[in-house]
Amino acid sequence: MRVWALPLALLALVSCVTQSVPRRQQQSRAPAMPARPVVVDPVALAKRLVSMQAGWPRSRKFDCARLKCVALTFDDGPGEHTWRLLDELSKRDVRATFFVLGQMVAADRGGQTVRRIVGDGHEIGNHSWSHPALSGLPLEEVKRELKHTEEIVRRLTGVRMRVMRPPYGATDKKVEAETRREGLAQILWSLDTLDWQDRVASIVAKRAGDAKPGSIVLLHDIHRSTVDAVPAVLDTLSKKGYTFVTVSELYGKTPAPGRTYTER
């Protein structure tokens, strides 16, 4: 294949990806997300896909042993507010980590949002397929929850995820062993904004603003109030001299598979 044709071939391949992934029989379908106009530049997307082949995530080096680093993490998406969140982060050249649900990726109109997450240089992690407490499942179900999400993200983006977050933070020796086999580090958090409970942007922003150096901050991009809070969070922490990094950047390398992390 000619070099100039590679981006177009990649773009055609991505557009043909199906959203069908095996699901557990008892699983309910994810609610369809409201349609919204999304303009995708095919040339820009093709360039991003070529960049992904060359290596992901893009290398950025921070000495978080000396800098005041904070990792903002967003769970349970992609949802109807994620695109707007990505716009806000892009305006300020901020990178974050997104722990996605497989069923939400499958509902996302061909994976436009998850591809943008990767294309914008954010880190993407496995948050299971349907958000069960993994510690309460048989081993085979744990494997399915992780594998199905891994498969759909990899097909849509070409990315092999290296981090995961167990729903509810529920983990045990069985989950630890399976994540080690799958090459996934378990990422928990040190600051819970409780944005799922208090859906008020000012409250969420105030809690996130209390981050300490090395914090991993838990947020959810499925809530409008959380996305509304993000500009204030970025303003507050920027004024305090914080550097926004992905989880892997926080540690200066990809975290070790199976191991549990809560902060630097």
Image (cartoon, rainbow, N blue to C red):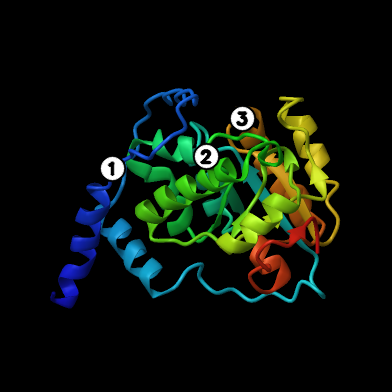
Separation of residues labelled 1 and 3 (CA atoms): 27 Å
Of marks 1 and 3, the one in the foreground: 1
Q: Which residue is mark 1?
A: 18
Q: Which residue is mark 3?
A: 223
Regarding residue 246, the answer to whether it shows in the image is no
Q: Position of residue 112 (x, y in %)?
A: 37, 44
Q: In the image shown, does 26 or 31 lie closer to the viewer? A: 26
Marker count (numbered): 3
Q: How far is mark 2 from mark 1, CA to CA?
A: 16 Å
Q: Secondary structure at mark 1?
A: loop
- Identify the mark nearer the N-term, 2 or 1: 1
Q: Are marks 2 and 1 in contact (CB under 8 Å)?
A: no
Between marks 3 and 2 in the image, the one whose residue lies nearer the viewer? 2
Residue indicated by mark 2: 129
Query: Looking at the rendering, in which quadrant would you find the N terminus?
Result: bottom left
Residue 232: which quarter of the image? Answer: top right
> Which residue sits at x=79%, y=62%?
241
Q: Residue 29's x, y, as percent? A: 44, 24
Whether residue 162 is situated above or below residue 153 in the rendered picture:
below
Q: Is residue 34 left or right of residue 201?
A: left
Q: Are marks 3 and 2 in contact (CB under 8 Å)?
A: no
Sequence-wise first label, 3 or 2:
2
Helix, strand, or loop for circle 3?
Answer: loop
